[in-house]
Image (spheres, rainbow, N blue to C red):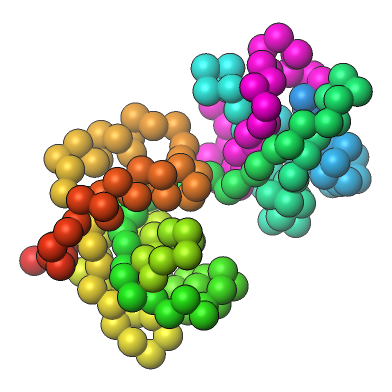
């Protein structure tokens, strides 16, 4: 896949039902995305839609926050006359690390999580997402060093991080990861954490 503008917002679009993007053609998929996105042609002049045939996904790159929001809302695509269920997620920015916090109230929805974590009190926080319907929240931070604590509203939560020596190499080598991908990866780590042990940089 060719390099995309570094400062763009990237959205990963996954098409359900086993549709092979390579066989159907990148142009047909791109047309379907632009149609359902309902974005004016002038406003999407700087956008790039690029298939990743190896992972069978489409990466949409845009400098516009408004466009990215519309792409993320994609739930289905009409391709070659057939409707296909789809899912779209923002990709994690470059040079990021992840951590998790526990015992976050279940009453807190996505907007509240974002508002209480991604704010000036946590200047390096980029995004946050709850793991299913649990009290565990996964979040992304700018850089490769996970902080010891994160401010959540008026509270401080101890951060749990992955203890993997190849973490930096993973972030340098992987081209992007959506928050949904992170949820899948970290879920196994959470299952293994049977003891209440937290890790941080001393």
What residue lies at 52% left-to-right and 23% top-to-bottom? Answer: 55
Residue 112 at x, y percent in the picture = 55, 77
Does the image show residue 156? yes
What residue lies at 82% left-to-right and 44% top-to-bottom? Answer: 37
Q: Which is more toward the observer, 190 or 140?
A: 190
Q: Is residue 90 left or right of residue 156?
A: right
Does the image show residue 125? no
In the depicted structure, whether residue 138 falls above or below residue 180: below
Residue 120 at x, y percent in the picture = 45, 78
Extent of the magenta region:
1-28
The part of the image, by quadrant, that contains residue 160 is: bottom left
- Residue 67 included in the magenta stretch of the image: no
In the depicted structure, whether residue 43 falls above or below residue 136: above
Q: Residue furthest left?
A: 202
Residue 75 at x, y percent in the picture = 74, 45
Q: Is residue 75 left or right of residue 10?
A: right
In the depicted structure, whether residue 112 falls above or below residue 159: below
Q: Which is more toward the observer, 194 or 91?
A: 194
Residue 157 at x, y percent in the picture = 28, 77
**Number of residue marks:** 0
What residue lies at 69% left-to-right and 49% top-to-bottom? Answer: 72
Q: Quadrant of the C terminus?
A: bottom left
Q: Residue furthest bottom?
A: 154
What residue lies at 60% left-to-right and 42% top-to-bottom? Answer: 10
Q: Quadrant of the N terminus?
A: top right
Q: Is residue 148 left or right of residue 19?
A: left
Q: Is residue 117 left or right of residue 23?
A: left
């Amino acid at each position: 896949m060719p390099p995309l503008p570094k400062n763009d917002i990237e959205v990963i679009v996954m098409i359900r039902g086993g549709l092979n993007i390579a066989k159907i053609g990148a142009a047909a998929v791109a047309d379907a995305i632009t149609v359902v996105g309902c974005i004016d042609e002038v406003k999407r002049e700087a956008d790039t839609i690029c298939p990743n045939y190896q992972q069978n996904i489409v990466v949409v790159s845009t400098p516009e926050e408004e466009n990215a929001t519309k792409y993320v809302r994609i739930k289905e695509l009409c391709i070659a006359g057939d409707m296909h269920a789809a899912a779209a997620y923002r990709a994690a920015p470059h040079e990021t690390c992840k951590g998790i916090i526990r015992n976050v109230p279940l009453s807190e929805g996505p907007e509240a999580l974002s508002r209480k974590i991604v704010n000036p009190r946590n200047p390096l926080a980029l995004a946050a997402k709850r793991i299913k319907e649990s009290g565990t929240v996964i979040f992304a931070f700018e850089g490769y060093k996970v902080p010891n604590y994160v401010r959540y509203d008026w509270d401080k939560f101890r951060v749990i991080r992955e203890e993997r020596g190849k973490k930096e190499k993973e972030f340098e080598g992987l081209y992007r990861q959506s928050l949904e991908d992170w949820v899948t990866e970290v879920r196994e780590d959470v299952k293994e954490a049977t003891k209440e042990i937290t890790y941080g940089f001393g």
